[in-house]
Image (spheres, rainbow, N blue to C red):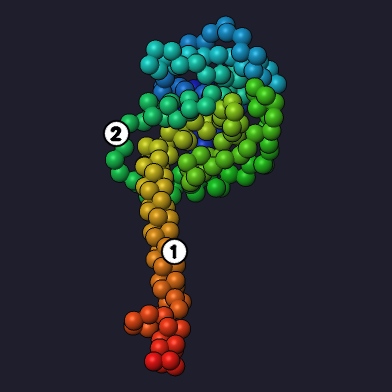
Amino acid sequence: MNCMNCSAPLPPNAVVCEYCGSRNDTDLAGVHTYTTHELESGRMCPHCHVALATIDLKIGGKFFIERCEQCLGLFFDPGELEALLEDSVKHVYAVNLEKLANITHAMAGEDQPVSYIKCPVCSKIMNRVNFGARSGVIVDMCKAHGAWLDSGELRRLLEWKKAGGALLHEQRKIEAAKAKEKLEKQKTTDATVFAQLNKPPEWEGGSLFDQVVSWLFF
């Protein structure tokens, strides 16, 4: 991808041009047509501490999310990020392991300091979660109010999904569920066998006590 200001090539996974210093909107440019609204959300950017702008991505009619006009970070209400990915990347039927490995390797090579940020809604510290378990994109999550993506992270998630990352994640979830079910069945079988092996022996015609009594008195 090239810089939208000077057309110089952007470094991998970067949003700031090394030549002119311009910050590029790599997340929404060329992906969605959107409009900015003068809606007062009262939500603040966790990095810049300025009010977030409300934008409409026009998915299925209206689709409002918040964006910081300074750092270009994005905030999604619960379920909105998944809905955006679903609408943006469709018809993925194969997993490209080589491409996924390259994406993960490129992200792992970034030396970014770990920082915890506050939710734009409730101001509580958000959890850092690896989206899709293995996407390599660390999303800041508030269980109650939604997810924050730093500038450039949405583009990475789109590339991850195009390479079959979401499909691979679902396949592994199914495999894990099957393995768990198999393990539970094996535990039940083992418990049944153990109980049978440790069951007190019974003699034909009655219990051992009855058999001894019959020998003594009859």
Q: Which residue is mark 2?
A: 91
For the point 68% across and 17% down, the residue is: 50
Q: Is residue 61 above or below residue 71?
A: above
**Label 2, residues with CA under 10 Å away: few <14, some 14-19, many ≥20:** few
Circles 1, 2 touching at the beta carbon (< 8 Å):
no
Nearer the observer, 6 or 26: 26
Q: Residue furthest front?
A: 218
Taking 172 as reference, is 134 left or right? right
The answer to whether residue 45 shows anywhere in this view is no
Looking at numbered disc 1 in the image, what kind of residue is underneath it? Answer: Lys
Q: Closer to the N terminus: mark 1 or mark 2? A: 2
- Residue 174 numbered tag: none
At which x and y percent is residue 170? 39, 44
Q: Is residue 23 above or below residue 197?
A: above
| Quarter-of-image position of residue 75 | top right
Q: Which residue is mark 1?
A: 187
Instruction: Give the quarter of the figure containing the N terminus.
Output: top left
Looking at numbered disc 2 in the image, what kind of residue is underneath it? Answer: His
